[in-house]
Image: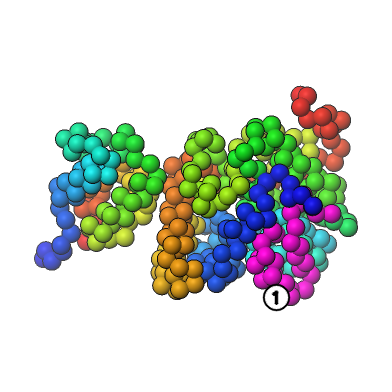
Amino acid sequence: MMTTQFPKTEEIEKWLSEHLSELLGIPIASIDTKTNFDRYGLDSSAAISVTESLGNFVGRDLQPTILKDYPTIQSLAQRLTATAK
Amino acid sequence: MGHGPGASAEAIQYHYDVADEFYELWLDETRTYSSALWDGELDTLEAAQLRKLDYHIDQARARNAESVLDIGCGWGSLLHRLVGTHGVKQATGLTLSNRQSSHIRRQAWPGVEVRQESWWDHRPAAPYDAIVSIGAFEHFARLDQDATEKVEGYRAFFERCHAWLKPGGCLSLQTMSYENSKRDDFSDYFKTEIFPESDLPRISEIAQASEYLFEMVTLRGDRDHYVRTLQAWRDRLRARRAQAVAIVGDGTVAKYDKYLQMAMLGFHGATMNLLRIGFRRIDRPRRSAMSHASP
C-alpha cells in the first residue's frame, strides 16, 4: 500500500540539481548527476547546508556525512529512495 | 606569569566557559568532552566515555598509583574515575577554565585537587607516577607560530612531563591531529568562532617533540570513534534544543550544531584524525636530547 509521500528518485535528483545550481551560481545544464560533489567545489560548510535543506525536502533527518558516503546526485538520490520506508 | 606557547586563558574560557548547564545537556553524565572509545553497535555514550577513561588510565599505568596528573582535566571525569574507581590516592587536575575548576571544587572529591593553571606554570611539589592528557594538546600551539616554534612548544610540554614523572613513568595522550590536511586547510570558522588561538598537531610533530624523552608504546588512530561521539553529542543537542536555546540563545546553539557537523565531516573524510598515544619515559635520555635541533 503506497501511503508514503516520499519523493521519487528523479524528483530528488531534480531538487538537488536546482539547489546546487542556485547555491553555487552555476547553470543547471552544467550539473551532471554522476559527477562528484567535490568537483563543484562544495566545501564542508556548504555540504552541511545542502544536507539540512535536503532533509527538509524529503522530510527526514539526514546525517551530515551522507554527501561523503553518497558523493553524487544520482547515488545520493538512489540511496534516499532505497532507504525510504 | 605567562601562559606558555598555546592558547591563552581567555581563549580557553571563550569555549569552555559558555555555560556548564549547556554542556551538561548534550555531553554524557560524566561530562567528558572528548572522543569516546566505542565497542560494538549497542554501546552507549556513557559506557564509551568510561571505557576511554579506563583505557588512558591503563596506558598511563595509573591504577592504584600514589599520584597522577591530568593536564586539561575538563570537568573532572578522569580525576573522579582515578580516585573513585582505581584506588589512586592523589589526582591533580590542571585547567584554565573558571567554570571547570569551580565545578570540580564543588564536588569535593576526596583525593582530588584542581589547579587553575597552565602546564607551563605548573610546579609540582613531588614527581607523579603517571600523567594523562586528553583533548588539551589541541590548545598547545597557535596558528601564528612557525613550524619551529610549534615543535619547540610541544617539546617544552614533553620536557615538563619528563621532569615531573618518576623513572619508568607513563604518559597517555589523546589529541586531534591533522591527517590528510595542512594548516592552510584549517577552517576560518573553527579558528575564529570555535577554538581561537589553537592549532592541531601532526603526528610527525608529536614524534619529533617527544624523541629522546619518551618512547611510543601504543598508537591508535581512532577518527571513526570521534565521528560517532560527535554524532551522539549532536543527537542529544538536537533532542534538547529548546532547553539549550533557553540557556545560551539561538545563535550559540546554531554555532555548536554547525561545529559538531563540520568536525564530523573532518574526521569522517580523514581531514583530521584522533590520536591516542601511550608513552613511556626514557629514564636516561642521551645528551643530544638537550640540543634537539641536531640529529
List the residue tagged with mark 1.
B106
| Residue B105 belongs to the span the image colors magenta | yes
> Which quadrant of the figure contains the C terminus of chain B?
top right
Lateral position of residue B249 relative to residue B152, left or right: left
Residue B246 picture quarter = bottom left
Which of the two residues, B243 or B87, is positioned nearer the viewer here? Answer: B243
Which x, y percent locates residue A51? 31, 52
Lateral position of residue B131 relative to residue A15, left or right: right
Determine the residue positioned at 51% across, 35% down.
B184
Residue ranking furthest to the right = B125
Which x, y percent locates residue B259? 46, 53
Determine the residue positioned at 74% across, 54% down.
B118
Residue B60 visible from this viewpoint = no
Residue B7 visible from this viewpoint = yes
| Residue B30 belongs to the span the image colors magenta | no
Seen in the picture, residue B58 relative to A36 is either above or below; the reply is below
Mark 1: amino acid: Arg
Which x, y percent locates residue A59? 24, 61
Seen in the picture, residue B68 relative to B180 is either above or below; the reply is below
Determine the residue positioned at 67% across, 65% down.
B98
The magenta span reads B95-123
Seen in the picture, residue A31 relative to A55 is either above or below; the reply is above
